[in-house]
Image (cartoon, rainbow, N blue to C red):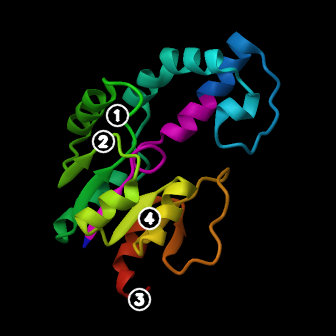
Amino acid sequence: MNIGIDLDGVLFDTENWFRTYATFYNAEHFKCKEVDREELYFQKRYLWSKEQESEFYEDCYRQIEREAPLMPYAKMVIDKLKNQGHKLYIITRRGHSFSDEIPITETRFKEEGLVFDGYYFGTENKAEICKNLKIDLMIDDLYENIESVSLAGIKCLYFRDLVLKRFEDNALVHEVRNWAEIYCEVLGFDNW
C-alpha cells in the first residue's frame, strides 16, 4: 500500500508545541486577550496583527521544527509498516514558509533514523500529489486537506487533535488520535 504522511501534527508534535509556545509568547510579548480557546490557528485565537504573527514565526518557527518530538510510537509504527512492504511518502506543506525548513527537516529525519520512499515538501495541493503517487491512504491533521484528498477518492486517516472540528459522514475518512490507532487502521484497511 502507498501511504502519504503529513509532518506537523501527525509525525511531529509541532501543533501542540506551537499552541503552547504561542500562549507563552503572547503573555510575554503581546498580552492580547484570548478570544477563542478552541481556535486552531493561534493568530486568530489572540487576534494578532500580521506584524505580531510575523514576529512570532521569525522568533520560534525554526526552533519548534528542530525540537518538537516525534509523536509517541510513530517511529515504531513507521518501521513496522516499512517492514510489511508498505511505501511511505512524506507529503507536507513544510518548506513553503521558510527556505531552511527542508534542511531542518532532513536533519531531524537523520537524527530520528527515519527514511521514506519519497519526500514532497511545500505541497499546497495534496490531493494532486496523492493522485500522482497513487496513494491508497493519506494521514493528515488538517480538515481542509482531508476534505480535498477524500474528494479525490482517496481514503484518509484524520489525525484529529481535540481543537480540530469533526469530519462527518464520509466513508473515506476515519478519525485517529495516535500512531497505535494508525497501525490498527492500516491492518484493517481491507475492511473499510
Q: Nearer the viewer, residue 95 or 152?
A: 152
Q: Earlier in the sequence, mark 4 or mark 3?
A: 4
Few, some or many C-alpha atoms within 10 Å of disc 4 (few <14, some 14-19, many ≥20)?
A: many
Q: Which residue is drawn at 38% across and 64% down?
A: 138
**In the image: residue 21, left or right of residue 180:** right
Q: Which of marks 3 and 1 is nearer the N terminus?
A: 1
Say which residue label 4 marks. Answer: 149
Label 1: which secondary element? loop
Q: Earlier in the sequence, mark 2 or mark 4?
A: 2
Label 3 close to label 1 by CB (< 8 Å): no
Say which residue label 1 marks. Answer: 95
Which quarter of the rendered picture does the C terminus lie within? bottom left
Q: Which residue is drawn at 54% across and 40% down?
A: 15
Q: What residue type is labelled 2?
A: Phe
Q: What stretch is highlighted in magenta?
A: 2-20
**In the image: residue 93, left or right of residue 173:** left
Q: For the residues carrying marks 4 and 3, which lies nearer the camera in this image?
A: 4
| Cα separation between marks 1 and 4 | 20 Å
Label 1 close to label 2 by CB (< 8 Å): yes
**In the image: residue 67, left or right of residue 160:** left
Q: Which amino acid does label 1 sit on?
A: Gly
Q: Is residue 173 visible?
A: yes
Q: In which quarter of the image is residue 122?
A: top left
Few, some or many C-alpha atoms within 10 Å of disc 1 (few <14, some 14-19, many ≥20)?
A: some
Label 2: which secondary element? loop
Say which residue label 2 marks. Answer: 121
Which residue occupies the extreme top position in the image? 29
Q: Which of 96 and 104 is in front in this view?
A: 96
Q: Which amino acid does label 4 sit on?
A: Val
